[in-house]
Image (cartoon, grey):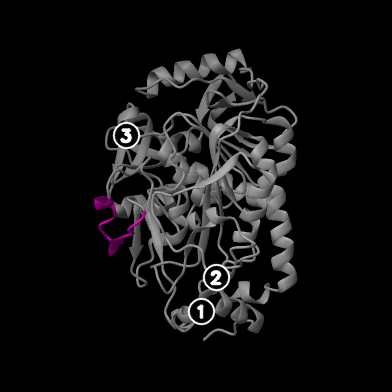
Amino acid sequence: MQNLPQEFLSRMENILGDEYSAFLASYEQGKIQGLRINTLKCESKAVLDEFDLKAVDWCDSGYYFNGDDRPGKSVLHEGGAFYIQEPSAMAVVESMDIQMGDKVLDLCSAPGGKSSQIACKLQDDGLLVSNEIIPSRAKILSQNIERMGVRNCVVLSESPDNLAKRLKGVFDRILVDAPCSGEGMFRKNPLAIDEWSPANVENCKQRQINILQSAVQMLKSGGVIVYSTCTFSKQENEEVINEFLQNNEGFEIIDSKFKFCNGFNLDGSKFNDQLVKTNRIFPHKYQGEGHFFAVLKNNQEINASKYALQPSKADPKAVKEFKAWQKDNLNIELDANLSFGQILYAMPSGTPKLDGLKVERAGLQLGEYKKNRFEPSHALAMALKSGEVKRVLSLTKQDAEKYLSGQTLDADGVKGWALATYKDVSLGWCKCDGALAKNHYPKGLRKI
């Protein structure tokens, strides 16, 4: 058994009572591994036939994979066909009841697993704002959003309180996957044990309460906040929600789509009765690591002031070149409506004004205007399906591996810009002359 802190063990015994021994026994088992199919790029698990997959009960696109498999090293992973995600974490977005067309905020979103799951629910319809306060983590988040082919996501790197000042009453759904002490990940990540302390638990609690209060200001009337952690701590879970309900009388906890454990050893005189509707995932009861979440509905009327939309301000010359390129190479029309320097973006409809905010990604990067010509971006390739382009270079697994290492391939008579695909999953661009396909897979991503 891992060297678990004694105070942590005492707290868990207090929470679990008779189930404590079963909880301890779960640490003798191997960690649970899962992946979630990216339905923006991959419609069926049949594409992943090289892996031994078993369904996750609470997520239609979620699967456990065998410990001997290494899906993260596969061509399909590089193509964004799936996201490696801990199975318990998949339950959180499933509980949000996201509808196509919603405006959704993922407030603490790096590295991007839950954001990409939200994007699958939206199916490029509506707006996703994914925020990460730490710039280095925001870059990783943006890279994952790009790999998964998400078109309608704005990635920011801001503090929650600064966002709350700018985006009042904007969102239908907000996810607060709060920074926490990580107790639920001890089995998966033993390094988290070394960082644990009672003082850190209390510090996390105060930060979580502040983040939730920022989230409230950005939610519409009738909207939903889902609060989640990957910890077992009552301080960071039930106590945070209890204090939230005391400070926000217009909110109620509602049942989630799937019902997990709840109401563990709660003093009725101290805690709100609604807390029995919160959800805990324990590793001795479910096939997953530790998670907590609560679905909070806003029943209060909000006089939300109209927020300013980000104006379209794209370089006319760049737009002209893009439209000409699009006509020659795509079967769809994308709206080039924003420029940053020479870079063109298709900004999602309904994007709030971004001036003064730290923007990592302003929607789908279309490409760059260079000397009176347009060159498409890798992000655009990753967001396209084979039916949306004029030319496709369909690759075998061997050729796909060569492509990812930057090698030149046979063009098989194809001329012009072509989308390189494997099992109909887009990998990137090639520029073909009929004989050879020049590789445009980004050098920084190549598998040397």
For image coordinates 37% across by 33% down, the residue present is: 418
> In this orientation, does residue 133 appear?
no
Q: Is residue 264 left or right of residue 429?
A: right
Q: From mark 1 to mark 2, how far is it between C-alphas? A: 8 Å
Q: Amino acid at mark 1?
A: Gly
Q: Amino acid at mark 2?
A: Asn
Within 10 Å of disc 2 (Cα), the crowding (few <14, some 14-19, many 20+) is few
Q: Residue at label 3?
A: 386
- Highlighted magenta segment, given as a residue range: 45-58
Within 10 Å of disc 3 (Cα), the crowding (few <14, some 14-19, many 20+) is many
Q: Quadrant of residue 301?
A: top right
- Tell us which disc is closer to us: 3 or 2: 2
Q: Which mark is residue 17?
A: 1
Residue 57 located within the stretch drawn in magenta: yes
Q: Amino acid at mark 3?
A: Ser
Q: Are marks 1 and 2 in contact (CB under 8 Å)?
A: yes
Q: From mark 3 to mark 2, how far is it between C-alphas? A: 54 Å
Within 10 Å of disc 1 (Cα), the crowding (few <14, some 14-19, many 20+) is few
> In this orientation, does residue 20 appear?
yes
Q: Residue at label 2?
A: 265
Q: From mark 1 to mark 3, how far is it between C-alphas? A: 55 Å
Give the mark nearest the N terminus, 1 or 3.
1
> Residue 138, percent across and down?
63, 47
Q: Is residue 242 above or below residue 437?
A: below
